[in-house]
Image (cartoon, rainbow, N blue to C red):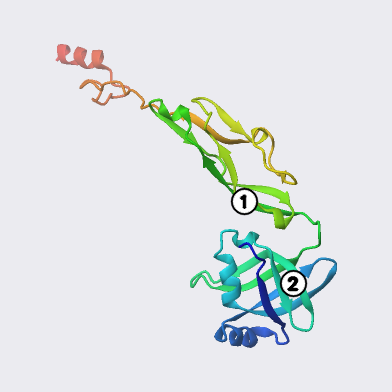
Amino acid sequence: MADKVVVKAEKREGRGKNDSRRLRVENKIPVSIYGGGEDSVAAVVNLKDLAAILRTDTGVNTVFSLDIGGVGAHDVIFQDRQIDPVKGRLLHADLRRISKGEKLEMTVPIHIVGEAPGLQEEGAVINQPLHEIKILVEPANVPDAIEVDVSNLHAGESIHVSDVKFGRGIEVHEAPETVLASIVIVREEELEPQTEAAGEPEVVGEDTEGAEGEKEGE
């Protein structure tokens, strides 16, 4: 999304279940806007407009302009969402205003790139403990993903948070020693052959000598 998306909205006057039901029939949803040093505002937005943003590559990390009639336009980002567990339909959204220069905590995916030479060894597999990572960054500079290059990774080696360049202005909320990728060797365990005798159950507490002695004494 090269150009910033502008979503039209209107102030919400009604409240309650009946009003929410009416909005759903009209394919609209209620949203709450807060932050940015201003009072919170309740508004109504067309469902298709927010759904289109959620379907983009940046999804919930997308910064867009919400233009509320009679209030004005503000850059906002998704803070929270309520989804219908059965239909998967967006029911409500909390949107946060963004002040210029403000950094927010965002969650972005981790993508493994490159071909690791360590995978050439027999039984070698790549281990990725984390599939997403939390960063502190200005919303306008949020990367689509954090790429971890394994082109020089050999068996038994690991790539840690401290080994990755995250880009200017990005603060990582993970310990430097956290492993992002490693090459491990998985080998099949050699099972000991089972003998026929080993498969016979042992009778605990059986006195074989005493049993033989009783037979001899009969």
> What amino acid is labelled 2 in the image?
Ile
Query: Label 1, on which residue?
Result: 108
The number of numbered badges drawn on the structure is 2
Q: Nearer the viewer, residue 61 or 86?
A: 61
Image point (73%, 49%), residue name: 136
Q: Secondary structure at mark 2?
A: strand
Image point (56%, 70%), residue name: 52
Q: Quadrant of the N terminus?
A: bottom right
The picture places residue 54, in percent across and down from the top left corner, at: 58, 66
- Left/right of residue 58 with respect to residue 139 in the rendered view: left
The picture places residue 142, in percent across and down from the top left corner, at: 67, 53
Give the crowd class for mark 1: few <14, some 14-19, many >=20 residues within 10 Å: some
Give the crowd class for mark 2: few <14, some 14-19, many >=20 residues within 10 Å: many
Q: Nearer the viewer, residue 4 or 143?
A: 4
Q: Earlier in the sequence, mark 2 or mark 1?
A: 2
Q: Secondary structure at mark 1?
A: strand
Tell me the quarter of the picture where residue 84 sits: bottom right
Q: Nearer the viewer, residue 172 or 164?
A: 164
Q: Nearer the viewer, residue 148 or 89?
A: 148
Q: Quadrant of the C terminus?
A: top left
Between the C-alphas of marks 2 and 1, the distance is 23 Å
- Left/right of residue 6 with respect to residue 55 in the rendered view: right
The picture places residue 46, in percent across and down from the top left corner, at: 61, 79
> What amino acid is labelled 1 in the image?
Val
Tell me the quarter of the picture where residue 138 sits: bottom right
Query: Label 2, on which residue?
Result: 33
The dot on residue 132 is none
The picture places residue 69, in percent across and down from the top left corner, at: 74, 83
Looking at the picture, does residue 109 appear above or below residue 118? below
Looking at the picture, does residue 73 appear above or below residue 2? below
